[in-house]
Image (cartoon, helix red, strand yellow):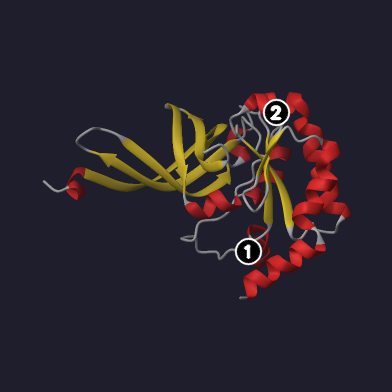
Amino acid sequence: MGKSHMTEVSEFRLEGRFLDFVIKDGYKLKGLLLETSEGECYVKLDKHLRVAFDFRLQKGTWLQVLGEKKHDLKTGEVKLKAYQVMAARIESRRQEDKGTREETISLSSSFSTSPRADVPVSSSSEVRTKKATILVCQKSDCMKRGGKQLCQALEASVSERGLESEVTVKGTGCMKDCKAGPNLVMPDKSRYSRIQAAQVPALMDKHFSPQVQTASKKEKTK
């Protein structure tokens, strides 16, 4: 029997609490860990979601996930792939999670919609996904070594340079090499360890000086 006949494919919709991000190679977002009524599960994110997902998502937030479920009839293995992630309707969770209304409303606009959805992605969302992204590890070891101050310094530097529309700072899950934290990855994939807030101006000059930006724009127009 062919492989295609051994796999059952269907659509799924589930709700669960966000537990953590699943990261590959230290900084590449692959999926989410959720706690559902049936236990903990892993949901792989479609590529378009990985690019635009907001790493500031708080653990414990209720999410609603829509996507494709593949059930291997031979092994019994089930794989979930998300095409859409939304904040779960707060009305159905009010008794279980008092006080989450404000958090849910503020986070609901952070998730990318599925390309299969009837409503097209707005132009503002398209612009946001094209921003250059600075990734900063948000795990405890890096935070203890100055990660919080590093994030604040990066965001302040982006604002001071008037780059808010071009550059965004996002926190990530563990990038590994925890003892060398804080760890961060610049938009060109350059990785830095043991970076402190005081080093941010020099780092920004190196990657976002007018000369660097001009050269980057010329490359894109070739």
Q: Secondary structure at mark 2?
A: helix
Measuring from the top left, give residue 85's x and y in whole percent.
Answer: 54, 47
- Graded by Cα atoms within 10 Å as few (under 14), some (14 to 19) or many (20 or more), the crowding at tag 1 reads few
Taking 16 as reference, is 152 left or right? right
Lower sequence index among marks 1 and 2: 1
Of residue 119 and residue 128, the one placed in the foreground of this image is 128
Count the marks: how many? 2
Answer with left or right where residue 219 lies relative to residue 64. Answer: right
Q: Position of residue 8 (x, y in %)?
A: 25, 45
Using the image, tell me which numbered label, if any, was put on residue 126. 1
Q: CA distance from mark 1 to mark 2?
A: 31 Å
The numbered disc on residue 142 is: 2
Q: Residue flagged by tag 2: what amino acid is it?
A: Cys
Where disc 1 sits, the SS reads helix
Q: Is residue 134 above or below residue 151?
A: below
Callouts 1 and 2 close, C-beta under 8 Å: no
Amino acid type, label 1: Glu
Residue that lies at the very extreme toward the bottom in this rendered image:
222
**As drawn, is 169 to the left or to the right of 42?**
right
Q: Position of residue 39 (x, y in %)?
A: 44, 25
Q: Is residue 211 left or right of residue 28?
A: right
Q: Residue furthest left?
A: 1
Looking at this view, is 208 or 50 the one in front? 208
Residue pictured at 58% horizontal, 40% vertical: 27
Indicate which label's residue lies in the foreground, 1 or 2: 2
Quadrant of the snapshot with the C terminus:
bottom right
Q: Quadrant of residue 220?
A: bottom right
| Residue visible at 60% across and 48% down in the picture | 53
Using a 10 Å C-alpha cutoff, classify the residue at mark 2 as few (fewer than 14 neighbours), some (14 to 19) or many (20 or more).
many
